[in-house]
Image: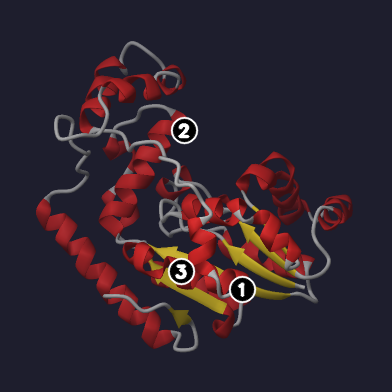
Amino acid sequence: MTIKLYIGAHKTATTHIQSVLEANEELLMKNSIRVSTPNRLRPKWIQLFMEYCHHNRVSNKEELLALSPTRGTWIFSEENFVGNSYELSQASTLYPNILMRLKCFVALYPKAKIELYFSIRSYETFYRSTYLEVVRNRGYLPFNHYYKETLFQSKSWVNVIEMFSQVIPQENITLWCYEEIHHLMPEIINLMTELNNAKKLIKNYPIIKTRESLSQKSLEVLASLSSAMSQEESKKIVEVINNKYPLSDKYPKFIAFDTEKAEQFRIKYQQDIVNIKNRYPKIKFLKGKY
């Protein structure tokens, strides 16, 4: 069996790629390609897997294998495999648990060929987007409660790729920049499916508009209400408020960093891309403007 492990990062169009794959599930199944996305993995598989990683229970392993394919190609796509957006604010490295989880995954399928697919994103927009996702999923908290300079200054995609390379052979790792997603989408789909008909597969997906990002105005309203309600209570009204103040010319997007800090992040991102390519020359880094 070949396992195509597509695990994020968060806020890098993983949902869109998953949707394209799901829309073509019947065709993929005819070609011995099974697709597992969050809709199917989160109810049971991920919970069993986390328990297996932490406790190494034989019963968990047996149940996980019973839920897994045994032949053909398995596209396993779940960004929460690496962690979640809130965890990014709790450690000095990006996705600190990924090394342990990858080792557990490889141990589960010792005879499979495992390929890893991952997208990185410029830090200033990545941190802004993951913060907004936290507000959506956990309720309002000020940005400075999420982003702490002393904790975030050492975070780097280079460290994430280093953890990947300790478990997965470099030649089995494919990376790309989120900023190039529209240009690279056909190549990504072709690599995952190996059918070389990406344009057709993409066309088969009727694009469904995703939720709008939270506007600056929505955050301001949530902030004004935060003293009168708990974080859990604010979670219940996030979408109601954002529907009233949707992202638009009238209600612009939330700006997390000033111009100088944003530029520093962009420079660091470009430097890290160069470092990744130099340190891990066998990794397939899909070409784009970076």
**Residue wearing tag 3:** 186
Name the quadrant of the C terminus.
Answer: bottom left
Name the quadrant of the N terminus.
Answer: bottom right
Q: Residue at x 74, y 42 (%)?
A: 44
Closer to the eye: label 2 or 3: 3
Label of residue 168 in the image: none
Q: Residue at x 77, y 70 (%)?
A: 72
Q: Which percent across, then down, holds residue 79?
A: 54, 53
Q: Which percent across, then down, holds residue 211?
A: 40, 36
The first of marks 2 and 3 along the sequence is: 2
Number of residue marks: 3
CA separation in Å, label 2 and label 1:
36 Å
Residue 162 located left or right of residue 182: right
The first of marks 3 and 1 along the sequence is: 3
Q: Quick check: can you spot residue 277?
A: yes
Instruction: Judge the density around disc 1: few (<14), some (14-19), many (≥20) Cα neighbours within 10 Å.
Output: few
Q: Which residue is drawn at 40% across and 72% down?
A: 158
**Residue wearing tag 2:** 137
The amino acid beneath tag 2 is Asn
**Residue wearing tag 1:** 195
CA separation in Å, label 3 and label 1:
11 Å
Q: Dot 2 lies on which element? A: helix
